[in-house]
Image: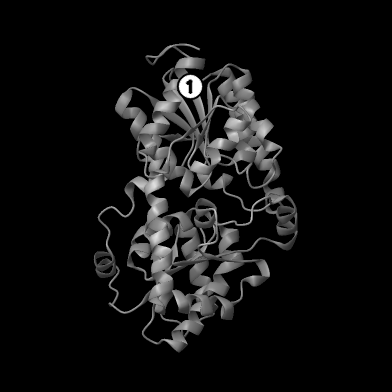
């Protein structure tokens, strides 16, 4: 491992996006940097060396993780040993707090500058993790503006960097261009985004397709576009579609932004995709479902009134959320009918989305890179200009 190596550990597709943006911004300032750890295809395309496939960290739910726990613990011990013996310039853990905070704690104790990119949801649940965060990292990089005051109250160094997606969406994608690319007509389009993880698709996709079937019966001209986050999810969705032989739907692999741009409304699993839909200013219905045991444990510790990012960012309910047993095809179809065919309801969401978009567009990649460089200058090797603290 080179002495100019920054380690990044990202656990899922959204982390791959953040990691790639951070790498590009750092390389613009320090072209001789190297990067390794755990990352996805966007990071790998920039020269990142991943030690294991990123999907090995992508697990949903408190119960679901148990089956993979031995593997995850072994992997973390391997990383701790590697980077304790050969300290990098810095470690940047992107999200995946249950995995990354322990890794960061060990390396910080061994004088490695550590940054946690994406604030753990200590403001929402498991408040006790704030003390773990303080012990684990020299700096938290927060994507969302309401997170920063929480860290300030606890005297934990944190920087609000904005969200990288807000800087690039919608880009040059407009609805007409997206529909032409997907070979769609110019009648109403409903986008279905049931999640990027296997368990999310398992829990939600069948109900998404059932709701879409009800809508297509009522509105035969309605076009349905189903987004598969990766090849594994595509195969999973193709199997599910065998149970809906009469459904007319376009299955699209790895082009969620194109799907969102083409849509008039979106049925989406709670997560980063809700933020993407917001940035495209698409009216949405948000759904989520965990295993019953995971949900009971999660709900017991939940401290906020909402789970979706649009509502959390607005500080009030601006999109409908259906959770657990509320995820019913008829209920979903009724809400989506309103979003598709009631222009006042759709426009009300769009206008609120535009305001939030403006708050989040802060040049996040460059801001995150500056923060990482500052942490290295203060706590690590003297490779960047800056004063030691």
Q: Residue at x 43, y 11 (%)?
A: 387
Which corner quadrant of the image does residue 163 belong to? top left
Left or right: residue 211 versus residue 27 is right
Give how far across and how far down residue 91 sits, in percent: 52, 27
Whole-percent x and y of residue 249? 41, 76
Q: Quadrant of residue 100?
A: top right
Q: Quadrant of residue 18?
A: top left
Q: Position of residue 35 (x, y in %)?
A: 42, 29
Which residue is at 46% across, 79% downward?
A: 337
Tell which of 51 and 39 is nearer to you: 39
Disc 1 packing (10 Å; few <14; some 14–19; many ≥20)? many
* Residue 246: image location, x then y, percent: 46, 85
Question: Which residue is tagged 1?
Answer: 375
Q: Nearer the viewer, residue 381 or 379?
A: 379
Q: Is residue 1 visible?
A: no
Look at 41% across and 86% down and name the residue there. Answer: 219
Instruction: Indicate whether 1 appears above or below 236.
Output: above
Q: Is residue 277 above or below residue 246?
A: above
How is colour applied across the structure in the image? one colour
Residue 100, can we see it? yes
Whether 129 is drawn above or below 208: the answer is above
Tell me: 329 left or right of 1: right
Give the mark count. Answer: 1
| Element at label 1 | helix
């Amino acid at each position: 491992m080179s002495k100019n190596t920054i380690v990044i550990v990202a656990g899922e597709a959204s982390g791959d996006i953040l990691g790639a943006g951070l790498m590009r911004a750092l390389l613009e300032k320090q072209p001789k940097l190297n990067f390794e750890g755990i990352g996805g295809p966007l990071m790998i395309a920039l020269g990142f060396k991943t030690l294991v496939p990123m999907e090995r960290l992508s697990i949903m739910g408190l119960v679901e993780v148990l089956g993979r726990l031995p593997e995850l613990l072994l992997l973390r011990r391997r990383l701790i040993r590697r980077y304790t013996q050969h300290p990098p310039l810095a470690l940047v853990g992107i999200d995946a707090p249950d995995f990354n905070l322990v890794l960061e704690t060990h390396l910080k104790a061994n004088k490695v500058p550590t940054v946690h990119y994406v604030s753990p949801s200590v403001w929402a649940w498991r408040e006790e993790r704030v003390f773990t965060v303080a012990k684990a990292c020299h700096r938290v990089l927060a994507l969302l503006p309401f997170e920063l005051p929480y860290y300030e109250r606890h005297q934990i160094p944190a920087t609000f960097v904005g969200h990288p997606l807000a800087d690039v969406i919608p880009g040059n994608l407009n609805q007409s261009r997206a529909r032409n690319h997907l070979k769609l007509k110019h009648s109403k389009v409903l986008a279905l985004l049931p999640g990027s993880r296997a368990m999310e698709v398992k829990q939600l996709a069948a109900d998404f397709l059932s709701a879409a079937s009800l809508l297509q019966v009522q509105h035969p001209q309605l076009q349905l576009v189903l987004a598969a986050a990766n090849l594994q999810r595509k195969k999973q969705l193709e199997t599910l579609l065998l149970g809906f032989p009469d459904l007319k739907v376009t299955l699209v692999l790895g082009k969620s932004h194109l799907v969102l741009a083409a849509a008039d409304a979106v049925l989406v699993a709670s997560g980063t995709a809700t933020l993407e839909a917001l940035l495209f200013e698409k009216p949405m219905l948000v759904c989520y479902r965990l295993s019953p045991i995971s949900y009971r444990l999660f709900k017991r510790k939940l401290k906020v009134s909402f789970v979706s990012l649009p509502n959390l960012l607005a500080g009030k309910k601006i999109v409908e959320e259906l959770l657990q047993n509320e995820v019913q095809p008829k209920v979903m179809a009724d809400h989506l009918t309103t979003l598709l065919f009631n222009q006042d309801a759709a426009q009300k969401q769009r206008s609120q989305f535009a305001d939030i978009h403006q708050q989040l567009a802060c040049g996040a990649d460059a801001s995150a890179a500056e923060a990482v460089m500052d942490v290295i200058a203060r706590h690590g090797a003297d490779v960047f200009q800056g004063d030691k603290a």
